[in-house]
Amino acid sequence: MHSPQPNVILTSSFSTVAEELLHKGLLPPGAMVAFIPTAGDCYKEKPWIEADREALVRFGYAVIDVDLKDTNAEKLKEDFAPADIIFVAGGNTTYLAAQAHLSGFDGIIHDLLRQGKIYIGSSAGSILAGPTVEPFIAEDLPNLPADFVLTDPSCLHLVDDIVLPHYPQYAEQDDAIAQKYGERFRFMKMTDQEFRASFENYMERF
């Protein structure tokens, strides 16, 4: 019997769990991946992005970069049309959320998933799948230009929880966030060896 593919896969570090995802049958064979590196724009060195891209290439996937910066929803629909997987890499979550709104990505992602495409997030890409970036704005702003403005902190609402990636490397910071915002949002602490897969909004931890 064919196992259903998940709509959403959230990871703290995709490259770390990629082989496990493949072996569990959660990744489709011979896929085309639309790879979104936008969250890394704020950094000169971004080895985590290269590691995630290389993991996808090792699986024999065709990987094309799709930048959310300086584009629009209609162009994105064209870019995503041939893709089986929409992969959102890590970096600065606040900047990523801003570009998701400016590009119109936030307005088309739900329809793309209804078409059968899979959303995979890594670190900031997993946070973007949740309800808001609000708890991360203060720590993200120092890496952004002085004139940067985030007009809308909401994210994609693919899942109800906010991922706290790379736990426990940033345990003190993450615990402080969870304590400060815990009455308003639900949090999901995730180590680099963990992932979550959502099947039609049903969250299952492996």
Image (cartoon, rainbow, N blue to C red):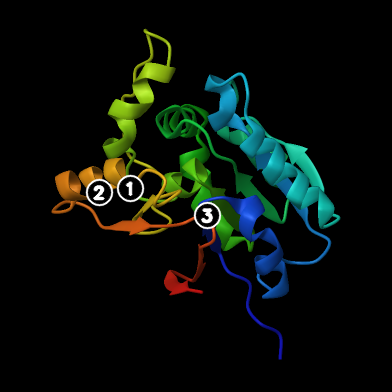
**Residue drawn where x is 37% and y is 43% of the image:** 170
Secondary element type, mark 2: helix
- Disc 1 from disc 2: Cα separation: 6 Å
Residue 80, relative to residue 149: is it above or below? below
Which amino acid type corresponds to the residue marked 2 in the rendered image? Asp
Secondary element type, mark 1: helix
**Residue drawn where x is 50% and y is 34% of the image:** 104
Residue 99: give x, y in percent of width and height. Answer: 49, 28
The answer, for residue 68, to whether it is visible in the render is no
Label 1: few (<14), some (14–19) or many (≥20) C-alpha neighbours in 10 Å: some
**Residue drawn where x is 16% and y is 51% of the image:** 184
Are dots 2 and 3 in contact, CB under 8 Å?
Answer: no
Q: Which residue is mark 1?
A: 171
Q: Which residue is mark 3?
A: 192
Which amino acid type corresponds to the residue marked 3 in the rendered image? Asp
- Disc 3 from disc 1: Cα separation: 13 Å
Q: Residue furthest top?
A: 146
Q: Nearer the viewer, residue 58 or 107?
A: 58
The answer, for residue 107, to whether it is visible in the render is yes
The disc placed on residue 175 is 2
- Disc 2 from disc 3: Cα separation: 17 Å
Which amino acid type corresponds to the residue marked 1 in the rendered image? Ala
